[in-house]
Image (spheres, rainbow, N blue to C red):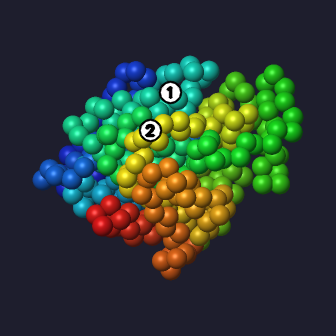
Amino acid sequence: MTLPTSPALTYSIGRVDHPPTYYEVLTPAAGSTKPPVVMIHGGAHTGACYLATPDGRQGWGHVFVAQGYQVVVPDWPGLGRSGYIPLAETSGEVIVAGLGEVLTALAGPAIVLTHSMSGAYGWKLLERHGERITKLIAVAPAPPGNIQRPAEIVGETVDAVTIRLEGTTMAIARHSEQPIERAFVDHTLIGGSTLFPRDQIASYAAALNPIPARLLLERRNVAGSQLRVVDFSKFRGKPVLVLTGTNDLGHARAVDEPIADWLNANGAEADFIYLGDLGITGNGHMLMLERNSDALAQLIIDWIES
């Protein structure tokens, strides 16, 4: 995947130390008076998914810069360029801590955009750093442990746990990283999408990263381990968007709309946008990488500015 450059922006990098978290900053060449947008990647990816698409177009980060936003793109602590964290210590709590430090390092409050697994981190960031977040966008997000049903465990050993998921079984190692197999790419990341550039699937899959086992166990809420929100005081009045595509096999309307309902029940001002209701069909899980990614970025910007 190549990373397009543009004379319309300036580029810098930053890092926080506890836990080590790397981030890139894209700033409009003319500067910005708008809140920065922090784009947080999902599992198996790095922040690069917001910089370029598999078919070589500029990613969401560049689209937002063109609309006058500074964009901040971190890699999760312990992954990508963020620096080493022992595998046994890599958890959702650690990732939230690192991302929270990034928010604190910025000059002012930011808009936060999450995707997939990082959806659960977004809810915790809102709980802990709501004063640093003006709005939150959650694209096909992981639910919080408050409403996610625990995975059905069908087998356990010292080294692995086997769960039943959507009619199939999955073995998750307890003390290692879970490699990204092509079946996961085809079924979960691309799924029923008619808009993913399929001639680029092989190169896209080759660039994905293993997911630390503990993060995957949390994502499946094994033994109730998914992150939960305890204090909702910073949810009150907070604008949140939950955005879902029509062809995402793991994020049907019936899966994601209850997240918006949960947010509203706890004081947030949440909107749920199912793209099919806008006449936009064919999007799978990786909305920022699909052929209509520019239009989807504009949809998010329109929501932010409405």
The percent position of residue 103, horizontal first and vertical second, equals 33, 36
Residue 293, picture quadrant: bottom left
Tag 1 and tag 2, C-beta contact below 8 Å = no
Is 247 placed left or right of 123 in the picture? right
Q: Of 23 and 250, which appears nearest the observer?
A: 250
Q: Of 164 and 238, which appears nearest the observer?
A: 238
Residue 140, picture quadrant: bottom right
Q: Of 182 and 132, which appears nearest the observer?
A: 132
Task: Determine whether 193 is above or below 80 in the image.
Answer: below
> Residue at left 30%, top 67%?
306
Say which amino acid is labelled 1.
Val
Mark 1, residue position? 94
The percent position of residue 288, horizontal first and vertical second, equals 46, 59
For the view shown, which residue lies furthest in the right direction? Answer: 155
Is 253 placed left or right of 93 in the picture? right
> Residue at left 55%, top 66%?
245
The percent position of residue 193, horizontal first and vertical second, equals 60, 67
Q: Secondary structure at mark 2?
A: helix
- Disc 2 crowd rating (10 Å Cα; few below 14, some 14-19, many 20+) is some
Q: Of 179 and 269, which appears nearest the observer?
A: 269
Mark 2, residue position? 127
Task: Determine whether 96 is above or below 139 in the image.
Answer: above
Residue 135 in view in this figure: yes
Task: Determine whether 225 is above or below 195 in the image.
Answer: above
Residue 45 in view in this figure: no
Query: In the image, which is nearer the foreground, mark 1 or mark 2?
Result: 2
